[in-house]
Image (cartoon, rainbow, N blue to C red):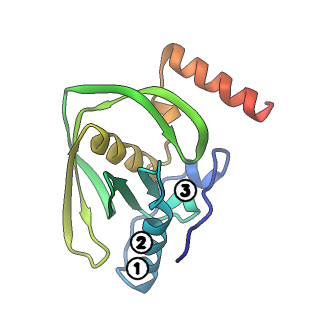
């Protein structure tokens, strides 16, 4: 069992778009296994490969005790209906902020063997799908914040880091 350390905000890998997966091989299988084992802990809803220092378009989810993954995911549908709720991130530990996301999402990609997969969800699942695809695009949830929520979150971050 391999539980990988999680990279935190400030690590350049979190701000760099991840590389598409081109080979569905043993290396990918090992990465997926590590992602799934690392996300398999209470309080962890998702984990993208850049968060463990790997530039690959892969993420794992742990929603309602169901662990799954997607390779080369792309969002194909987002609802106009929105949800507002506190969001956090393993790469920004201890910081939660109200983040607006689509209420429903559809994401298409592949499984570890290269077979097409579609994951649909509402509420927490939709939030997690959007959050993890953002990671693969070099974004963190703080980038989605606006107004007072953004100012409060950035102030809290500065106070924690002493910057």
Labelled disc at residue 51: 3
Q: Residues within 10 Å of mark 3 (few under 14, many from 20)?
A: many
Q: Residues within 10 Å of mark 2 (few under 14, many from 20)?
A: many
Does the residue at mark 2 contact the one at mark 1 (Cβ under 8 Å)? yes
In space, the residues marked 2 and 3 are separated at their CA atoms by 13 Å
Labelled disc at residue 32: 2
> Where residue 142 sits in the image (x, y, percent)?
52, 33
Residue receiving disc 1: 29
Residue found at the far bottom of this picture: 26
Does label 3 or label 1 sit earlier along the sequence? Answer: 1
Residue 16 horizontal side relative to residue 74, left or right: right
Asked if residue 145 is positioned above or below residue 47 in the image, the reply reads: above
Residue 83: quadrant of the picture: top left
> Where residue 56 sits in the image (x, y, percent)?
46, 65
The residue positioned 48% from the left and 25% from the top of the image is: 145
Q: Residues within 10 Å of mark 1 (few under 14, many from 20)?
A: some
Residue 18 horizontal side relative to residue 83, left or right: right
> Where residue 80 sits in the image (x, y, percent)?
19, 27
Secondary structure, mark 1, is helix
Residue 117 horizontal side relative to residue 136, left or right: left
Does the residue at mark 3 contact the one at mark 1 (Cβ under 8 Å)? no
Name the foreground residue: 15 vs 110. 110
């Amino acid at each position: 069992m391999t539980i990988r350390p999680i990279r935190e905000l400030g690590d350049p890998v979190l701000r760099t778009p991840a590389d598409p997966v081109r080979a569905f091989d043993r290396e990918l299988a090992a990465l997926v296994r590590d992602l799934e084992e690392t996300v398999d802990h209470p309080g962890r809803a998702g984990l993208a490969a850049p968060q463990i220092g790997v530039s690959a378009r892969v993420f794992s989810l742990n929603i309602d005790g169901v662990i799954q993954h997607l390779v080369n995911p792309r969002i194909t549908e987002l609802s106009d209906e929105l949800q507002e709720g506190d969001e956090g991130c393993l790469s920004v530990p201890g910081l939660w902020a109200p983040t607006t996301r689509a209420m429903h999402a559809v994401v298409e990609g592949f499984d570890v063997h290269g077979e097409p997969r579609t994951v649909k969800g509402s509420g927490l699942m939709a939030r997690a799908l959007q959050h993890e695809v953002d990671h693969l695009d070099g974004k963190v949830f703080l980038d989605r914040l606006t107004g007072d929520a953004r100012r409060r979150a950035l102030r809290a971050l500065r106070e924690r880091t002493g910057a």
